[in-house]
Amino acid sequence: MNQPANTTAAAAPRPSFGAQLHDAASDWWQNERPTWIYVFKMVFAGLLALGIGYALDLESPRSALITVFIVMQPQSGMILAKSFYRVIGTLVGSVAIIVFVGLFAQTPELFLIASALWIGLCTVGSAHNRNFRSYGFVLSGYTVALIGLPAALNPGITFDSVMTRGTEITVGIVCAGLVSALVFPQASAPGLVRIIRGRFTAFVDLIGATLGGTTDRKQLDIANARFVGDIIGLEALRSSAIFEDPEIRLRSGRLTRMNSEFMALSTRVHALHQLMNRLHANPAPSAQIIIDAISPYFKEVQPLLTRESGEPVMSAVDAADAALKLETYKRELPRRVRATRNTLQLDSDAAMLDFDTASELLYRVIEELHAYTLTYASLNQRRHEREQWEHAYASKTSMTTALIAGARAAITLLLLSAFWLASGWPSGDVAALNAAAFCAITSAAPDPARATRTVAIGVVFAAIAGYIYTFHLLPRTDGYWMLAAMLMPALMLAVWLTTKPKWAGYGLGICIFFPFLAVPDNFAHFNAAGYLNESIALLVSLIVTAVSFMLLLPPTTDWTVRVLEKQLRKQVVDACFGKLGHLALKFESGTRDLMHQITMLTSSRPALRQNAFGWTFATLEVGHAIIELRTELNGIRTERPDLLSAEAYAALNRLRETIPALFSTPNRDTFADALAANDHAIAQVQQTIGPHYRERSERHRLQRTLSYLHFIRTALLDQQSPLHTMRDGAANTTHSGARHAT
């Protein structure tokens, strides 16, 4: 009889205390060391700026310290980019101050109105732009509030105030940039490489799963949302990295090109996946014949993106080999598809149209994938012809929401300024300028009211700690070095909090307002009443800002999401009537930018997000097909205008009118008109092709046109689209509906 195993003897020996300590230290070194290096660098840069400010006998050296914390970013490229736009914003704001003081110094009411309008305009610019350009607009408005309001009380010191504040800001920017670049520099390039490699690998997996039929709609939506974040993240990193790395500047055009090609490729893959889903849902026997005929091609794609070892392509060197295999496959694909088409035994023209549309989309996927892989492979070289790319990423924002953000900032400043003038509150100017600044700074946050509340809690801590420092510790210090040693613990805590997403708002409040309250000017003043007044003013300004975000058309309401959805649908209108030059890129990037904004706003509202995603994909599918159709027709009109009949051109023009009407005002009537116009256009193009002989190039052009029309129809009839709710009663009005796959 077998004896039971001695589990105690077989157990692995317990690691010694030294081994456990070594493992813990290794884990800390890998995960926490970069964070603490960043904390020490920023505190060192801030204290260096403070010391230089004292040495230069600047009026308020704490402004240099605060500037360091405002521009601080993990990568040096981000700091340089943010600093660049901060300088531009400060210069523009300084010019505005001189103009406003010169015009309205004798009438404070007019000065405040002009300042409010300027800050509102700058907030609109901030909400309408992306990355650090947005920050430049914020600084243009913030500078007017920060320097202009005190200068309006004493116009004679305006020029001196502008020059002094500009010098303080410059000292902070220079210190932050130098320390970030020279002390344990953290470049942006590795982050770019990680995004590029990770995105390529994830997309290869998605292609394998999507074309293999193992990805459902929900998984595809999640993947597309992640890819949108990657697209915007790569563009932000690229625009920052060009400030620090000449190698990135040499490849900037290719990085932009990769983003553009990736957007087009992901749209193609999504369109092909959706078409195959609709075929799988079609009970007709011909649908299964088409699936069986086209599916073998899908299984051939992923091996093209796999190395000989079986691992996926990751580096640019690997991508060069994959590009060669894709080029060969793309060259052979049309001939093989034609051979497959000739063997099909289908019972209707509609079924053959399904196959033609699927095969056309497959070819486009391979074509876009080949271009994307070629650009990825070219990154291995310092200079390459694919660098010639002038189509920049085009962000898209709603002017309605931007104007609301600007009006909110202006109204908040006017209300607090009116209270300041009416009450004679000594620190009313601090409350007014700080509220205006935070209205602009937080307007782009997903939940500005919540973000402002967390900063307000940080201000409470800063006020308490600042009081202790100012009235109990500062009188006992002697000289800069003791002051720096005294400030270091609080500043390190504040910067460390900003590295934790959950506590970043608290840390930001401490980073900015603790130095504002606790760090003395060159001529130190110990005025408890003034200190309390300023602390209360800061807290009141943030409370008023949070209330304004909750009362003045809050950006977190469903109404804001509906405005963005309307802007999203307007992309289809632009696809129908915009100039064809660069239209595809503007459409792709604008749609994804709006999708990203909706994703941020609906993070805690899954039902609202799902509906918005439905409109996003309907917009992408129909809009992209419309652009392809217009491009094809433009070529036909230019080279062979007689290829289509006058009736076909009229039907296509009618479709171009009804599709924008549907997406502008989606309802049963506009849906019925669009579907009827689409069916009529399909019938006219089918009649043009006819049974008679045509040259292969002519027939291929007409079949491509027919494929785009057919795909638009399947997108309109997609049961998972928001348009599906308008379908009842519309499909029955089209006598040709039974002729095409649904």
Image (spheres, rainbow, N blue to C red):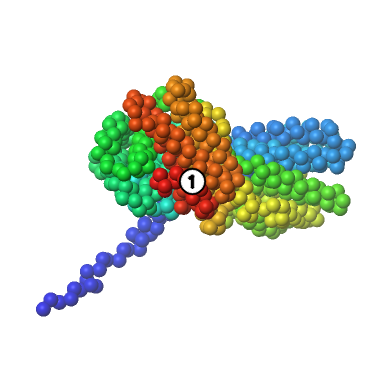
Tell me which residue sits at (85%, 36%) in the image: 105
In the picture as drawn, the residue positioned furthest to the right comes out as 106
Q: Amino acid at mark 1?
A: Thr
Q: Position of residue 289 (x, y in %)?
A: 29, 46
Query: Which residue sits furthest bottom?
Result: 1
Numbered circles on residues, count: 1
Q: Is residue 10 above or below residue 639?
A: below
Nearer to the camera, 517 or 733: 733
Expressed as whole percent of the image width and height from the top left, the position of residue 547 reads 71, 56
Expressed as whole percent of the image width and height from the top left, the position of residue 643 reads 43, 25
Q: Residue at x 75, y 42 (%)?
A: 145
Residue at point 64% right, 37% down? 136
Q: Quadrant of residue 6?
A: bottom left
Q: Quadrant of the N terminus?
A: bottom left
User: Can residue 537 be seen by looking at this rendering?
Assistant: yes
Q: Secondary structure at mark 1?
A: loop
Q: Residue 294 is drawn in which quadrant?
A: top left
Q: Nearer the viewer, residue 12 or 469?
A: 12
Determine whether, in the image, residue 512 is placed left or right of residue 631.
Answer: right
Classify residue 117 as left or right of residue 346: right
Q: Residues within 10 Å of mark 1 (few under 14, many from 20)?
A: some
Residue 640, horizontal then vertical, whole percent = 44, 22
Q: Please give the name of the residue rendered at 46% of the width and 27% of the height, measured from the top-left corner.
A: 645
Residue pointed to by mark 1: 734
- Residue located farthest toward the left when viewing the structure as drawn: 1
Can see residue 525? no
Q: Against 586, is 310 above or below?
A: below
